[in-house]
């Protein structure tokens, strides 16, 4: 995952744990695509001050993810649900080609519905 995208994802998970300024600066930099100079000018501080705040915020975001792992867990959950959905589709296909059990068909529909609700 590219660092820009990774920071944006981590900001979604842990952004509320940053200071208001850190959250604002990192959001302006990554989400609004403003330059350090533009942010500094708008905030009335130095470019270096903005850069330092963003770097501190990035460090905190990566440290929180390393300790808590919410973003990685969510990614793993999404991948697992996709696999379950795929397996249910395969079971349904095999069921139609072989035994045509109504119970199996109903259960695979329930599995796929549950996966879709969780996604």
Image: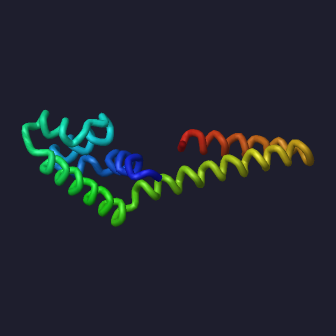
Q: Position of residue 33 (x, y in %)?
A: 31, 36
Give the vertical position of 30 relative to 48 (above or below): above
Name the side, left or right, on which 56 lies relative to 95. Answer: left
Residue situated in front as seen by the camera: 68 or 96: 68
Q: Position of residue 32 (x, y in %)?
A: 30, 34
Outermost residue toward the bottom in this view: 67
Q: Which residue does the image show at 29% across and 56% down from the upper left?
A: 61
Q: Which residue does the image show at 66% across and 51% down from the upper left?
A: 84
The image quarter containing residue 66 is bottom left
Q: Position of residue 12 (x, y in %)?
A: 34, 45
The colour style of the image is rainbow
Image quadrant occupied by the C terminus: top right
Q: Position of residue 113 (x, y in %)?
A: 63, 39
Residue situated in front as seen by the camera: 79 or 84: 79
Q: Which residue does the image show at 14% across and 50% down from the upper left?
A: 48
Q: Which residue does the image show at 83% across and 41% down from the upper left?
A: 102
Residue situated in front as seen by the camera: 74 or 63: 63
Give the vertical position of 78 relative to 113 (above or below): below
The image quarter containing residue 67 is bottom left
Looking at the rendered structure, the number of numbered marks drawn on it comes to: 0
Outermost residue toward the right in this view: 98
Name the side, left or right, on which 61 lies relative to 1. Answer: left
């Amino acid at each position: 995952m590219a660092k820009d995208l990774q920071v944006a994802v981590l900001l979604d998970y842990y952004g509320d744990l940053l200071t208001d300024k850190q959250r604002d600066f990192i959001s302006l930099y990554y989400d609004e695509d403003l330059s350090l100079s533009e942010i500094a000018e708008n905030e009335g501080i130095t470019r270096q001050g903005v850069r330092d705040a963003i770097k501190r915020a990035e460090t905190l975001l990566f440290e929180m993810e390393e300790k808590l792992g919410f973003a990685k867990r969510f990614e793993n959950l999404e991948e697992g649900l996709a696999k379950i959905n795929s397996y249910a589709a395969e079971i349904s296909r095999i069921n139609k080609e072989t035994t045509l059990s109504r119970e199996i068909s109903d259960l695979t529909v329930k599995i796929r519905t549950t996966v879709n609700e969780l996604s």
